[in-house]
Amino acid sequence: MTGLHFAREGVLVRKALRRLEDGPRSSVDLAAEVLGVHGCPPAMARRLVTQLLEGIPEVARDGERGDAWRLATAARRARKPAARRLRDLRYAVVDVETNGGVAGQNGRVVEIAIVDVDRGAIGGCYSTLVDAGVTIPPWITRLTGIRTEMTHGAPSFSQICDPVREHLRGRVFVAHNAAYDWGFLRAEMRRAGAGIPRGPRLCTIHMARRLLPGLERRGLDSVADYYGIEIRERHRARGDAVATARILVRMLEDAERRGWTTWPALRKALGPVPRRGRGKRRGRNPAQHEQHDNGDNSPNDGMSHRT
């Protein structure tokens, strides 16, 4: 064995438990994410993580050879927030700007912002440009103001994976077309070899369909205008994320007035996510970007659980 000793109530054990809240992790993943030992051989990683987690009641082994770890059933139940009131949940409101490609293929995130919403109050905002090593086409620059040279010297997505995951951890993921923003985040995390957080997602377009049925268009501009919310720095990640956060607060107030006071009640009231084929995705060309902003024909754009 390694001869190392880890405190059962120590920082590293708590960090491992937070990682396992996102789902099972291999010993190699935990060695890298918790212990900071990157590229560790599987046998050594298994020994290290075993010494860290063996005997911790909240943790169980997973996988055929016991090479993975997960939260025990009772621990998962204790962390499940499903019955909590909407106003008591914690939300991470996200917006990404991209190079105009397709998530998981040639599309890359060039800017991200995450706004915290706690107990109906808007908190801090994490935002940064991202150097994806790609050229930003002129039509994206005209729309967002982001030029290729602006991303030079910015962190790569692999360098911001940890802070992004920390801002998402334990929160409901919210975006205006959640499938779009989550699809790009998931693709970037996979590309960086990072674990993908799990948890509930909520889309303000889908909420607008139920809460504002008389609204002809449900793009960010239209919904913000309905609530009298000014969008500063439109089509920049920070500006759009802050506006979406303010919209979310108003929508949650509307939902509670209708008696949808808990997460299960909201899910039931919103109903299944509309599926209208693949639809148009922001990022292929200016017309398709405008289609995304209209809030129509958005694939899988409602509330669901991350996979």
Image (spheres, rainbow, N blue to C red):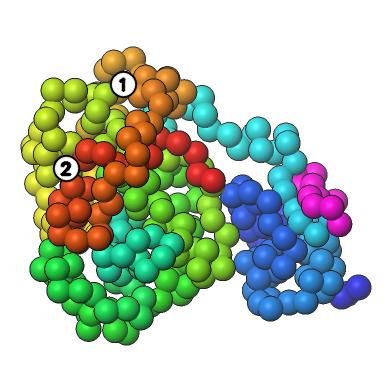
Residue located 66% across and 77% down the image:
38
Q: Where 158 sits versus 281, above or below?
A: below
Residue located 68% across and 51% down the image:
24
Query: How far across and how far down the image is residue 217, in percent?
Result: 13, 35
Pick the quarter of the image with the N terminus.
bottom right
Quadrant of the image occupied by residue 147: bottom left
Magenta residues, start to end: 55-65
* Residue labelled with disc 1: 256
Closer to the camera in the image, 150 or 107: 107
* Residue labelled with disc 2: 294
Q: Which of marks 2 and 1 is nearer the N terminus?
A: 1
- Secondary structure state at the residue bearing disc 2: helix
Query: How far across and how far down the image is residue 131, in percent?
Result: 34, 77
Magenta part mainly helix, strand or loop? Answer: loop
Q: Where 272 sits versus 249, above or below?
A: above
Residue located 53% across and 32% down the image:
81
Magenta stretch: residue 70 in it? no
Q: Which amino acid does label 2 sit on?
A: Asn
Closer to the camera in the image, 9 or 296: 296
Closer to the camera in the image, 13 or 50: 50
Query: How far across and how far down the image is residue 39, in percent?
Result: 69, 78
Q: Where 104 sits versus 148, above or below?
A: above
Say left or right for 93 vs 45: left
